[in-house]
Structures are given as C-alpha cells and as structure tokens.
Image (cartoon, rainbow, N blue to C red):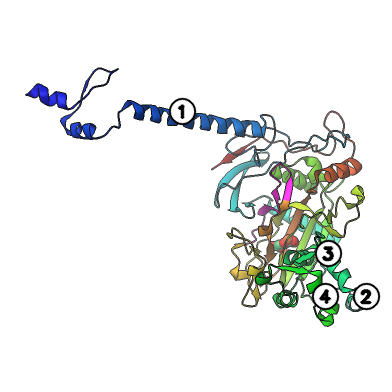
Amino acid sequence: MMESQELSGTYVSPTLPPLTVPRQDRVLLHKSNVCSRTYFVVVMVFFHVYIINVIALLLYVYYNNGPGEIGTSDGNPLINGESSSHQPPELYKSPDLGSPAKIHLPRFEGIRVGHIQKIALMPNKVHTMQTLSLKPLLFEIPDFLSEEECRVVVQLAQLKGLTESLTTVPEGREEELEQLDLTPEDIFNLLDLNQDGQLQLQEILTHSHTQDGMWLTPERLQEIFAGLKANPGHNGLLSLEEFRGLSTQDLRSFPVQLGAKRPQLVQNRRHTWLYQGEGAHRLLQALRNRVTRLTQLPPSLVDLSEPLQVVRYNQGGHQHAHHDSGPVQPETVCSHTRLAVNVSARYETPCRYITVLFYLNSVESGGETTFPVADNRTYEEKALIQNGVSLLDTQKSCDQGNLRVKPKQGSAIFWYNHLSDGKGWVGELDEYSLHGDCVLAHGTKWVANNWINIDPDYQRQARYQELVAPRQDDDGGGTEANPEEYRDLHQDL
Ligand SMILES: O=C(O)CCC(=O)C(=O)O
Ligand SMILES: [Fe+2]
C-alpha cells in the first residue's frame, strides 16, 4: 500500500533515477507537463538565447565606445568609476582636412533628476554635481567658485566696465524697415529657409530666434499665425500662392512685425567680456581650465570659445526666455567659424554647445534662472503661449515655468544647448534648453557665462581650429597646459 502510494507520486525520467517527492506535490506533478523533456529543452534554448543576447549587448557597448576612446556611445567616460583618460582629447592633431580623425565628444549622462556624481576639478577638493533635468541635460555644481574668486571676477568686470545689453531696436531701424522695398516673393524666399517652396511655422519661428535679441510677443505671434493662416488645419504650411493672397498691409508690415515691434528682451542688464587666454588674470585662466575639466571637452575647443561674459542685473532686471545657441540648418552659419569657412549663408547664429553659468552672488528674492519647459514630455512652440500669456515672458510667467534655479554664490549650472548627432558630435539644437531670468526683486545679481562654441559641422570646426589655433608642440604643450594638479575622480552617489 505504502509502496503503491509512493510510486503514484514519483516522476520517472528515462535518464534520471526515480525521485520521491513529498506527498503534497504529487498531484501537481501529475497534472502538468512542466518537467517534460520538451519543456526542459525550450527553457534551455530560451536561457541560452538570453545569455547570447546579453553578451552581444555588452560587446556592442564595448566596441561602440572603443576601449581607448573618451566617451560612451553618447556619453560619459567617467560614470561609475574613474576616468579612462587623464587628459581630454585634442580635437585637431592633423592638418589633413580631408581625413580628420573625428573625435567623440564626451557627454555626461544625467541618469535621473536628483542624481549626484562626484567630480574632481581641482586639487584637494571633491565637487558634487547634481542632475537638475534631463531635457535639457542640466547639472548644478555647488561651490564651483570660492567666495574670493567670485569677488575677484566681479571686481575685474567692474574695472573693465560694463555696457548696457541691447534692449531695443537701434534708432532708425524702424523707418529703415518701413521703407523696405520687398516683393511678396522676396519676403517668401527670405523666410523659406529650406527653400522647399513652402513656408512652415518653424521657419517663421526660427527667424525670430536667429536674430540677436529678437523676441516676439504672444500677441504678435498669434497675429502672424492667423495672418499667414498657418494653423494646424492648414498643416502649418503656406505656399507662395497663399502667401501672395495676404493683404498688402500684412506683407508690408511683416518685416516690421518681426524686427521692430518687439518688446524688450532684457532690462536692467549690463555686461562685459573678460579674456581668459594666455596673459589673462591667473584666476580667469584657472577658471577656464576648471571648465575644461568639468566639461571634459578638448582644451582647444574651450580655449577658442568666447571670453567670459560677466553680467550685472539691477533691481527689476530680467531676461526673457531664449536659446543661447541657434538652430542647425543648411542656411545658417556659426558666428565663430564664419570667417574661416568662407561660405555665404543668410543667417548667422551663435553656436554654443554648452553654457556654464556661474552665480557670483546670492540673491534674496527673484532673479532665478528659469527653464520653462524642462523635462516636458513634448516641445511645441505654440504650447508656449497659453491664454495670451507666454512662458517666454519672464516678467509675467516666471512662476509657471517647470524649473527655477536660485542663484547661490559660487554655484555653477551647466547644460547642453544641443543634442548629440548620434555619432559623437554636436547635433540639433535642444529646444528644451529654453531658459530665461526672472525679475530681480531687490538688490543686484551678478552672473557669468562661459559658452563653449562648437560648430555642428565638424569640418568647419576643424578648419576654423586649424586657422586660428596656435601651433602646438609635439610634446603636447601649448594652450592646454593645465596648472591645476588633480586626481581623476568621477563617481556616482
Ligand atoms: O542670468 C541668468 O540667470 C540667465 C542668464 C542668461 O541666460 C544669459 O545671459 O544668456
Ligand atoms: Fe542664456
């Protein structure tokens, strides 16, 4: 009796000796075929396929990065451990323009909002870097500058003298625009950036972005949308025929609408530029080296970028939301490479891959840097205008923005104004990098901008560097000499 009960609960395998299982499991085992040979084979096949996939993925990641290369596929050599290289890569080693060894620009990974990484920027000090947003990729580094350094930068700026930032249309420009003798075809062609014979909303908006200080009120934008009949029902496209159909008054006033009748982009803002190259104040050079260290970019790129812009806002000062860099289009050319590349392009735009913004004093009330659409699910220009109020308007809607950073003395924030092109170089403008400066309620606010200029067209950047960069010694000396000794460190917390 006992024997027959035990046999009835025993799984008999052709290859394995019979197993005695506890009475409780017997019924289950009899009812299912989970231990059948077929099942075993299927599970093993899946298991092996899974393992092979994992190995293939690891190999892909490894070879995509290149074992000796800086940067991950899109990214950062330093995440999860020590830096793979002590010195950032040099962009341009060979004068052979035909086959420049294209380098892979390092790019940090944000991981997630709130993520903290440790970084070594200078001797005997470890900084932390916190991810503030992923779109744009934005980080904050407290104590990037000491109190003393902030003080010296402000004093150097005062010594040099600050000038009023451009706030209004230069005198005479309005009449000049009124007298413009442009046919509808001329206007259409000027606006049709990609020359596809159709006018897209984006082209009009781009026009409003590419000109220095250009900014349209929501009302003006809505008028233009309505005037051009460029609404969603119309696919956002306008042919020359349709464009011609607009009233002549609209057409005549169009350039004026775009150019002249804009609100003030900035108020109570004065700025100056401080050179940071050889011969500059030691602190300014050290600051630039620290920025090179922070961004992990080739020193030559940082060295050839714009000087440090130091800005002072007085009470009531602000700056409406804007992009620091411009769109990447065949018709545009970067301001910094323009002379070197000898191309005729209609639009010149600043090409600022990265902005590093330093807060030189703490601010009691207002004056935050705002990123109105940070980490939004989608980016739509039209969605920036809600109930007649624009998120671009930092006077009216600063508190409605998604993210605001409070100025704290010595802190730095930095963000990428462009996405990656997927091949390790600079890609499209990151629309989410839209930012502005809220109205300063009291006192004075001092900030400084370090913009890192890179042409999204690699060849142009390489040619520019070849023309303007000082010849470097074979021993690697020259512009990238870094007086700061430090130990490589970059670690996630
Ligand atoms: O002052 C700020 O907070 C932002 C400044 C800024 O965006 C700029 O100067 O381009
Ligand atoms: Fe800006």
Disc 4 within 8 angstroms of ligand 2 (CB): no
Say whether disc 1 or disc 4 marks the residue closer to the N-terminus. 1
Relative to residue 368, is residue 27 depicted above or below? above
- The residue tagged 2 is 181
Proximity of marks 3 and 1: CB atoms separated by less than 8 Å: no
- The residue tagged 3 is 162
Proximity of marks 1 and 4: CB atoms separated by less than 8 Å: no
The part of the image, by quadrant, that contains residue 373 is bottom right
Label 1 neighbour load within 10 Å: few <14, some 14-19, many 20+: few
Label 3 neighbour load within 10 Å: few <14, some 14-19, many 20+: some
Tell me the element at label 3: loop
Say whether disc 4 or disc 3 marks the residue closer to the N-terminus. 3
Disc 4 marks a residue whose amino acid type is Arg
Disc 1 marks a residue whose amino acid type is His
Disc 3 marks a residue whose amino acid type is Leu
Relative to residue 12, is residue 23 depicted above or below? below
Tell me the element at label 1: helix
- The residue tagged 1 is 48
Residue 366 visible in the shown view: no
Between residues 249 and 90, which one lies in front from this camera angle?
249
Mark nearest the camera among 2 and 3 is 2
Between residues 146 and 208, which one lies in front from this camera angle?
208
Mark nearest the camera among 4 and 3 is 4
- The residue tagged 4 is 244
Disc 1 within 8 angstroms of ligand 2 (CB): no
User: Magenta segment range?
Assistant: 405-427
Q: Examine the structure image and report whether residue 34 is included in the region drawn in magenta.
A: no
